[in-house]
């Protein structure tokens, strides 16, 4: 039997009672907030200041920055005894902030509604792509190590990212053959490769020369993917098209939902044509046997 990583890593696990009121956009079910790293053993660097929430901008988005203690927050599917798929959610924010509700907890609530455990990753920002990459690797391993206790199917663990978070998920999907940090404990014996990826208006997938970004070596071992983008997201849609072409060339199972309007950064809040993307994604998850 595998050791319980909540004991192996740290006792500092915060449990939110299932009867506690949820914040706006947060799933109503119980949540476990789990530190990613054993105390004092986080590889790489943190931020220079304490974690903070940025002032509101009038758009009902919670923006976090200066992440020094990365965590995952686990939102289980209520009322089921059957192991569910799980998705590790990576909010966007240009690797500067995390749009924590719009592209995090609100997404977990939607995933719960279709029978998937939502796991929101609070990864290191600002300006720390290497730290963020270590964080997502550890999050996948920690999820698999806890699969039984969290009522998760260990072979249906995916990643989902928005904007910069989409780049982070694409990077893991194409670089899952070797860890970027040394083994710390039994958690790091778990495999890195996600079983699937969902990329919603991903950023930074192409180079300035219009080629696939050098840090995204797509191959036949890249996991299945569902991609969402719109033609009017002029800054980043070209990267998604190039990534799609690379997936086609490598014969990776995937679906690319490309539509005319929606812009960038909408999460689940769009009233444009792209608003149907969650239904398209759910259909793809069912078609591929994940749901």
Image (cartoon, rainbow, N blue to C red):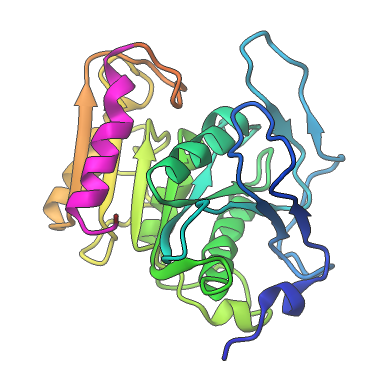
In this orientation, which residue lies closer to the viewer: 240 or 288?
Answer: 288
Secondary structure of the magenta portion, mostly? helix
Residue 59 x %, y %: 61, 11
Q: Residue at x 59, y 68 (%)?
A: 142
238 lies left or right of 18: left
Q: Residue at x 69, y 38 (%)?
A: 126
- Magenta stretch contains residue 60: no
117 shown above or below 273:
below
Instruction: Tell me which residue sits at (72%, 66%) in the image.
Output: 37
Is 275 a magenta residue? yes
| Residue 204 location (% of width, % of height) | 42, 36
> Is residue 37 found left or right of 288 in the rendered image?
right
| Between 185 and 43, the one nearer to me in the picture | 185
The residue positioned 79% from the left and 45% from the top of the image is 47
Rendered image quadrant of residue 211: top left
Residue 196, image quadrant:
bottom left
Q: With 12 as the anchor, is 178 left or right in this view?
A: left
Q: Foreground residue, 4 or 246?
A: 4
Query: Looking at the rendering, which quadrant does residue 15 occupy?
Result: bottom right
Spot occupied by residue 96 in the image (x, y as percentages of width and height): 65, 33
Considering the image in quadrants, where does the C terminus appear?
bottom left
Above or below — where is 218 with respect to 29? below
Examine the rendering and report whether any part of residue 211 can be seen: no
Residue 80 place in picture, x, y as percent? 46, 58
Q: Could you tell me if residue 264 is visible in this image?
A: yes
Which residue appears farthest toward the bottom when viewing the image?
1
- Total numbered labels placed on residues in the image: 0
Highlighted range, magenta: 272-290
Q: Nearer the viewer, residue 278 or 27?
A: 27
């Amino acid at each position: 039997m595998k050791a319980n990583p909540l004991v192996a890593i740290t006792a500092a696990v915060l449990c939110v009672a299932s009867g506690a009121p949820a914040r706006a956009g947060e799933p109503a079910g119980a949540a476990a907030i789990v530190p990613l790293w054993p105390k004092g053993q986080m590889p790489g660097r943190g931020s220079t200041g304490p974690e903070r929430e940025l002032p509101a901008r009038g758009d009902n988005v919670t923006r976090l920055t200066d992440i020094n203690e990365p965590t995952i927050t686990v939102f289980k599917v209520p009322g089921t005894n059957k192991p569910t798929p799980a998705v590790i959610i990576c909010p966007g924010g240009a690797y500067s902030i995390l749009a924590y509700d719009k592209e995090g907890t609100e997404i977990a609530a939607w995933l719960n509604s279709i029978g998937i455990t939502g796991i929101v990753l609070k990864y290191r920002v600002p300006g720390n792509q290497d730290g963020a990459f270590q964080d997502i690797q550890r999050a996948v391993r920690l999820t698999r190590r806890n699969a039984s206790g969290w009522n998760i199917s260990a072979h249906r663990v995916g990643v989902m990212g928005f904007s910069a978070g989409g780049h982070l998920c694409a990077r893991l999907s194409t670089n899952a053959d070797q860890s970027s940090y040394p083994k710390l404990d039994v958690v790091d014996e778990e495999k890195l490769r996600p079983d699937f990826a969902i990329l919603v208006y991903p950023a930074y997938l192409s180079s300035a020369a219009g080629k696939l970004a050098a840090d995204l070596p797509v191959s036949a071992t890249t996991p299945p993917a569902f991609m969402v983008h719109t033609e009017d997201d002029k800054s980043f849609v070209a990267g998604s098209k190039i990534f799609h072409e690379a997936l086609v060339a490598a014969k990776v199972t995937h679906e690319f939902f490309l539509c005319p309007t929606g812009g960038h950064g909408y999460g689940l809040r769009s009233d444009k044509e792209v608003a149907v993307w969650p239904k398209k994604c759910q259909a793809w998850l069912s078609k591929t046997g994940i749901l």
